[in-house]
Amino acid sequence: MKLKLLHATPSSSPPLTFSAIQLLAALVLLISLPLSHASVSSMTYVPMGNNPTLYRPGAEPIMHLDQLTFTDTVLNQDHAFLVEFYADWCGHCRAFAPFFREFASIVQAWDRVVTVAVMNCADSFNTRVCRENGVTHFPMVKYYPRAARHPSSAITLEASHSGLQLRDQVARTVVNEFNQFRYPDWPNFIYVNVDSTTTYGSLWQGVAESADYLAIIIEQYESVSPQFMLDLSSRSHAVGTRRALASSPITQMLMITEFPYVALFSRDRQRAIYMNPYSANTLNELNNALANVKGNQPKVTVTTPRPTVPTTTQPPVINCERFPDRCRDMYFVSETDMLKAMYMALHDEVIRTGEVIQGANFTHLYNFVDLLAEHFPVLTFSNEIARRGRNDLKRSSSTILKNSERARLVFSHLREFLRTKSDLQQVFANDWEHHFNSVERVYAFPFPVNSSWQHCKGTTPQFRGYTCGLWTTFHALTVHTYMDTIKEHRVDALKPLKSIQGWVSSFFGCEHCKRHFMHMTTELFPMTSRRVSLRFLRTLLQGQLIFQEI
Ligand SMILES: *[C@@H]1O[C@H](CO)[C@@H](O)[C@H](O)[C@H]1NC(C)=O
Ligand SMILES: *[C@@H]1O[C@H](CO)[C@@H](O)[C@H](O)[C@H]1NC(C)=O
């Protein structure tokens, strides 16, 4: 029997090989299936979605997250996360990015305690997870404690324009979490308590068994100790850290007079092998001391903060009255840009703001959709304001814009949908999203979400885009409302502006742009009927110039 089989083998070997490959393929499939469920990001992960990212995946110590990976990466982990939620089109996020980058490089060595990550909430791929995380403006910086089981456990930090301030905030937040949970594998942030019963061995409390060295930082009040201990946390298996207050007897024992101060002890020798005031160079000096003592190469990674030179670009402000020709180009309005912007404004931004759209937010959504349903331009139109002066606006041509016409039908349907909700003055974001998607389908997808920005295309993909599209549309809406109503002498110049202002205040994710806009429309140019006239159109135009560039 055995012999026979062996003999038969050569002739039947091709089909056998084939089925072996099939078996292998089946195995691979079996193995990869469960893996694809638990999608975890890594430092080299390239996020899903279509939008450009503000940070380069794999090239910086910043982890990229997306809808697929957020939950499995951030929640229920053995370390904390610091996540910046941004929008690639948001100027304030771009201005913030160098500081966040600086912060990420300073705290690179903290990664066993806290990982730095980012997510682009302007990418519609991530809309749902951004909403679940309560991302109401950009940039938004949140700390997810190690114990976080749910997005609501996150703590919002201030998006300071300083890498060092961000570091200090995170260090403080880490210490607060430690004080609550006392994780044994985090640096032991409890101040050393020295009294008559203290032994040398008791100083090593909370230090890993494997660590032969202990660095103690002594300070007068909680100042640099958290960051010092976190800087060394990735080496905790070799060098433990503790901290002590200047009032502790340890100060007298070591005869310290300057603070903060660092002393390094080795486990087998009951004396300090390094003692010096704390400085920016302390980590390097500790490295050298360790190398001398052990005769080995320095291993502590040192990240010295690089001074950053924030680049501020002044928005170009062009005087359109003096240089009408230079402004002409800016009056060019692209249908694609407006439709793309309105999709993001009504779909992505509205869905992102919360589970329920209610109260003032509901009213603002209704008024804005109403404005779009009534006055979203559906005919080509050449804007000649600068050329002809205020009282001579007229259409030079009137081709029907097919996509815009269908988009206006979508707006009308959405308005009807909101009317059915008007007694409760609320709509669930999920319902809004489903309704939007189905109406959009009915009218054969009039929003060219996959096309690139046209007039609003910037020098880099994340430049201008959405903000520019938004302001272009606001401007066009204002002008068209005027043109649509002047014939019947029922111009209410305030109404469209109020609708726009309402949408901005409830839904515009760019916090900085929102504040700027609200300031402009409430203080610089208050929207009262006395002040609002065609003059306001120019204000809006100038607003557009400013907003495009931030
Ligand atoms: C945009 O592209 C995605 C895939 O890349 C596709 O699923 C979607 O239907 C497209 N949307 C439109 C409106 O063309
Ligand atoms: C309105 O939306 C904002 C987010 O833009 C949110 O902070 C606020 O709580 C909402 N208001 C109500 C009444 O839901």
Image (cartoon, rainbow, N blue to C red):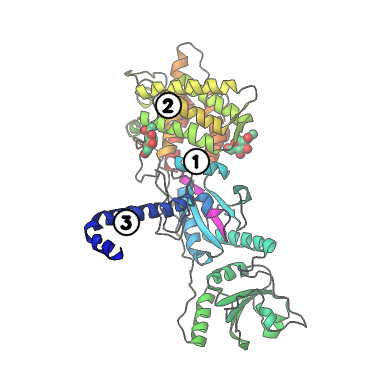
Q: Position of residue 169 (x, y in %)?
A: 60, 59
Earlier in the chain: of badge 2 and badge 3, it is 3
Q: Which one is in front in this view, the residue at disc 3 or the one at disc 1?
A: 3
| Quadrant, the N terminus | bottom left
Earlier in the chain: of badge 1 and badge 2, it is 1
Q: Nearer the viewer, residue 230 or 165?
A: 230
Dot 3 surroundings within 10 Å: few (below 14), some, or many (20 or more)? Answer: few
- State the separation of the CA atoms marked 2 and 3: 46 Å
- The three-letter code of the residue at mark 3 reads Ala
For the point 48% across and 19% down, the residue is 374
Q: Secondary structure at mark 3?
A: helix
Q: Position of residue 199 (x, y in %)?
A: 71, 84
Q: Nearer the viewer, residue 12 or 21?
A: 12
- The three-letter code of the residue at mark 2 reads Arg
| Quadrant, the C terminus | top left
Residue 412 relative to residue 52: left or right: right
Q: Position of residue 319 (x, y in %)?
A: 40, 35
Instruction: Establish if 11 lies above or below 372.
Output: below
Q: Nearer the viewer, residue 488 or 21?
A: 21
Q: Position of residue 434 (x, y in %)?
A: 51, 30
Query: Ligand 1 is found in which quarter of the picture?
Result: top left
- State the separation of the CA atoms marked 1 and 2: 19 Å
Q: Which residue is mark 3?
A: 20
Residue 147 relative to residue 88: left or right: right
Q: Which residue is mark 1?
A: 127
For the point 52% across and 26% down, the residue is 368
Q: Which residue is mark 2?
A: 441
Boundaries of the magenta span: 73-91
Where, by quadrant of the figure, is residue 470 drawn? top left
